[in-house]
Amino acid sequence: MSGNTSKVSFPLHVKRAFQPEPVPAMVRVGIAVLVDMIVVAVVVRASLTLVGYPDPDLTHAALPAVFGGMFGFLGSLGGTLKSGLIRAFVLTVLSLPLTLIAIGVWSWPIAAALALAAAALLTGMLAWRGEPWATLGIVLIYMYFVPYVFQAGRGVELKYLLITFGVMIVTTLVLRAVASLVPKKQAPERIKASDDATKAAPAHRKFELVPEPQLTRLRRTTIRSAIGLGLGALLLTWWGDHNAVWLLMTLIALVPPSVPLTIDRVLQRFAGTLLAMIVLTVVDVAIPIGSGRLVVIAVGLVMTIAYVRRSYALSVLGISCVAVLAYAGVTVPLSEALLWRGFDTLIGAAIAIVLTLLIPVGRRPKPVWAHEEPAPAK
């Protein structure tokens, strides 16, 4: 698009903001990850039962390994069987120390802030090198972030965590091998989670930084994200109110380390959250409390992954349904969780916008539309 974007009317800007990206929805990836989570959860829970872990706490003890297996499996898709198994092994092994750090810093506000800020910096530094490093960084930060916000594994003895992660690693490798047996046209493809428009660098230049002005924009984006997420982690841990988790979830969605914040993204975030509030209100009224609501979580998870590139608003709709139901639980009413989700989304969005003005991506402290050409970097 040319530089005459200022003449484009606001309604047309909004229309373009909600147009789907010209990429197919990754439904096969979403279904594959859902299957992986179900199998890993069943196997890990069975292993805990065999070693005598108390039944009422099985889900809490199994969650860290389930999360680690989910992201490890997601990051291993695509490529050859050998490369996929290597990626699955490395990522699932890394999930254990990341989870232990997430558990360890929860009671220490400064440590929690520094840890999440460092994770954001690492993610951004990987994104500066384009794909597939940008996607690797996103997988790693969520591998730390999800156990942290869900407090997964807190209070579980280390020996049980080691058992669950060991079982998860083996199970994930088996599932990755099974995925390679699916015919190529039906197999879940390799996910590209970032908005990086550059092509993957040749093998002999794979550590080369992305070109300007994209590099400067990404560096400022990373700094902004590290500050915002570090501040959010500090407030969450210091405040201690579990409802503040929605604020941090909004921040990582609006100011991720490798995707510049645009007006489009804010609008899509609000639209997706609003739709989720409507859907969850219907769920709260129409679906009785209990295991039947797990179906909504399953559908939401598939939608989150399938539309992460195709439509951010639909992906937000999916992850919001998953987050509220998973965090609040399927055995309690959702009214309180919905109230806090909406309230903290507004606060998180306000913080994100302030950070955008204080640390602009372009030359001027001015929010831009995604389809506008970025201003040349200084």
Image: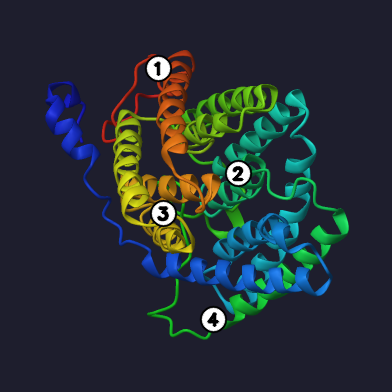
Query: Relative to 192, does residue 179 appear above or below in the rendering?
Result: below
User: How many numbered discs?
Assistant: 4
Q: Give the label on residue 180, or none.
A: 4
- Per the image, the residue denoted by label 2 is 126
The amino acid type of the residue labelled 4 equals: Ser
Which residue is at the front of the view, 237 or 241? Answer: 241
Most foreground residue, 111 or 120: 111
Q: Secondary structure at mark 1?
A: loop
Residue 74 is situated, as x and y percent measured from the top left of the image, at: 55, 62
N-terminal label among 4 and 3: 4
According to the picture, the residue beneath numbered tag 1 turns out to be 363
Callout in the foreground (1, 3):
3
Q: Amino acid at mark 3?
A: Thr
- Image location of residue 365, percent across then percent down: 39, 14
Residues marked 1 and 2 touching at CB (< 8 Å): no
Kindly tell me whether residue 271 is visible in this rendering.
yes
Q: Cβ–Cβ below 8 Å for labels 1 and 3? A: no
Q: Earlier in the sequence, mark 2 or mark 4?
A: 2
Using the numbered discs, state the Cα–Cα distance from disc 1 to disc 3 in whole angstroms. Answer: 33 Å
Camera-side residue of 195 and 168: 168
Q: Residues within 10 Å of mark 3 (few under 14, many from 20)?
A: many
Q: Which is nearer the N-term, disc 2 or disc 3?
A: 2
Residue 347 is drawn in which quadrant?
top left
* The N terminus lies in quadrant: top left
Mark 2–mark 4 CB contact (< 8 Å): no
